[in-house]
Amino acid sequence: MLLDCLVCRELVGDIPAPGGFLWQDEGAVGFHMPPLAEMGAPHPYLGHLLVVTRRHAARLGDLTDEEAAAVGRGAARLARALVEEGDAEWVYSAVIGTRTPHFHQHLLPRYPGTPDDVPWHSIDEWKGAKRGGAAEISELADRLKASRALAP
């Protein structure tokens, strides 16, 4: 863990993740993107989930086989939960890694009613995008945790 790493700080609770961890195992954890006013996102896109490695590893190619498998399991289960309980009609996945040097995979839901001309990579930027603060994120997290996809 690195104390100056945003993701490491989220993992140890220095930066609260409303709704807590949605999914976790020994290698990875999944949670909703927290409201981060200091990063210009006080009301993030609802359903924007992150799957992160517990170990501080910067890039996809830095993951062990076990960590990569954990990330894949978590991303698939969380994507199913977003469809089952989060009202998503589609879930996009991306690993970009340009701002935060700790591996994190983004899961971004596409909701019914999203205009067809909104591209996947801008799904959270259009005027009608669902946004919320800690209360809305916690409510969504409770619904996702109730999903069969996340049952042990």
Image (cartoon, rainbow, N blue to C red):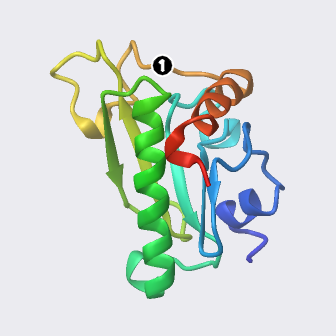
Query: Residue placed at 63% from the left, 68% from the top?
Result: 25
Query: Residue placed at 69% from the left, 35% from the top?
Result: 37
x and y percentages locating residue 58 in the rendered image? 51, 77
Query: Residue placed at 45% from the left, 35% from the top?
Result: 82
Q: Is residue 134 left or right of residue 48?
A: right
Residue 115, quarter of picture: top left
Q: Is residue 58 left or right of residue 4?
A: left
Q: 135 and 98: which one is in front?
A: 135
In the image, residue 23 sits, relative to residue 83, either above or below, namely below
User: What residue is disc 1 on?
Assistant: 130
In the image, residue 60 sits, relative to residue 128, either above or below, namely below
In the image, residue 57 sits, relative to residue 107, either above or below, namely below
The C terminus, quarter of image = bottom right
What amino acid type should be assigned to the residue bearing mark 1?
A: Lys
Q: Is residue 45 left or right of residue 145?
A: left
Query: Residue placed at 43% from the left, 75% from the top?
Result: 69
How many circles with numbers are drawn on the protein? 1
x and y percentages locating residue 34 in the rendered image? 66, 41
Q: Is residue 134 left or right of residue 111?
A: right
Q: Is residue 15 visible?
A: yes
At mark 1, the secondary structure is loop
Q: Is residue 98 visible?
A: no
In the image, residue 29 sits, relative to residue 141, either above or below, namely below
x and y percentages locating residue 1 in the rendered image? 74, 77
Dot 1: within a 10 Å radius of its alpha carbon, few (fewer than 14), some, or many (20 or more) residues? some
Residue 136, quarter of picture: top right
Q: 56 and 42: which one is in front?
A: 56
